[in-house]
Amino acid sequence: MVAVAAYLLTGVTQVSPEERVVVRRFGAVVARPGPGLWVGLPWGVDRIDRVPVRTALQLTVGYDQQTASDAAGTPPGQFLTGDQNLVNVQLVLDYAIGETDADLDDFVNHREAVSGTLSRVTEAAAAEWVAGRGVDRVLITGNAALPAWVAARVAERLPEYHLGVRLQRVSVAYLAPPEEVRAAFEAVTQAQAGIRTREFQALQEKELRERQSDALRYKLGQEAEEFRETQLRQARAEVAAFLDELAAYREVAKTNPDALAVIWWAEMGKALESLEARGGRVRPLDQHLQNGELNLTEFVPLRELKR
């Protein structure tokens, strides 16, 4: 009775929160219970397959530095670029098992083929991407562009294999030319990096010069505008003063015929004061008077006074 009881207890299964269980009875799937206690028929009648649906799985695909030297011929993960060069590529896939009933059934039925099939599909997608580009572009942009390309292609092709898995992320673990030519490629990469550095410095210098020229142009524009406004205000003031003087002269000329002479001598006084302020002196030239009608002045420079 103890043996019979122990045998019957083999039909009791505890399902953890991170997994699902596929129950097959004589080979046919009869249940897919979730977390909790499952009671079925004993071992030999029911077969229990535990599926870790909440566990992230990881698979390394492509070039392996440790086994590449032992491989005969072209090692896995070594691809030919579009310009007939070789590159070694190693990718890391993060995937998970689907939680739908169809995904669970597919994974249980093809569990042993998941890693191999996923590796071949990924290598085919990577080889397609590398073959369509030159070696320089592969080495420069591969770390950023290759994962997205491979993820899209693998996700598109996986459903036809019915593996029951979903690809979550692809990352590049290794991307480099073969060891025999790696030093030459690194020298080229360093030279290209130096070129890009100089281009960046030249771009920065260009932007700095443009900002300086913009600032100078703005400053000169402001100064020119201020000078223009000043000249306009001064010209308007002079015009207004002249018009006032003209109006005053016309008013005075109606009653005083000598009004123009008064204005003349007022302006001559200003001119003489300006001449004296420059370091000379002003004296009348009486010998040039004719009939007392001609008034002349002479500006005597300072050097003549010293003599």
Image (tube, rainbow, N blue to C red):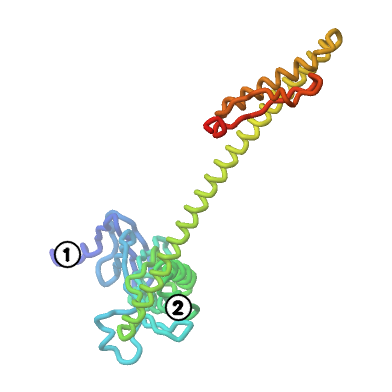
Occupied quadrant, residue 138: bottom left
Question: Helix, strand, or loop for circle 1?
Answer: helix
Horizontal side, residue 256 vs residue 226: left or right = right
Badge 2 amino acid: Val
- Return the mark for residue 59: none
Q: What's the residue at 40%, 78% (across, down)?
A: 123
> In the displayed structure, would residue 110 be above or below residue 6?
below
Q: Foreground: 175 or 193? A: 193
Task: Please state the horizontal and vertical placement of residue 23, each as a whole percent of the image.
Answer: 33, 66
Question: Helix, strand, or loop for circle 2?
Answer: helix
Contact check, label 1 and label 2, Cβ < 8 Å: no
> In the displayed structure, would residue 95 be above or below residue 66?
above
Q: Work out which residue is located at the far front of the displayed protein and give it.
A: 287
Q: Which residue is mark 2?
A: 130
> In the displayed structure, would residue 157 be above or below residue 99?
below
Q: Pick whichever of labels 1 and 2 is earlier in the sequence.
A: 1
Is residue 258 in view? yes
Task: Please state the horizontal and vertical placement of residue 15, each as a whole percent of the image.
Answer: 27, 58
Is residue 27 in view? no
Q: Foreground: 289 or 99? A: 289
Q: Work out which residue is located at the far left of the displayed protein and give it.
A: 2
Task: Please state the horizontal and vertical placement of residue 116, each as a whole percent of the image.
Answer: 35, 78
Horizontal side, residue 273 vs residue 74: left or right = right
Badge 1 amino acid: Ala
Quadrant location, the N terminus: bottom left
Q: Which residue is mark 1?
A: 6
Q: What's the residue at 81%, 10% (across, down)?
A: 252
> In the displayed structure, would residue 166 be above or below residue 124?
above
Q: What's the residue at 43%, 79% (across, down)?
A: 135
Horizontal side, residue 70 vs residue 110: left or right = left
Occupied quadrant, residue 86: bottom left
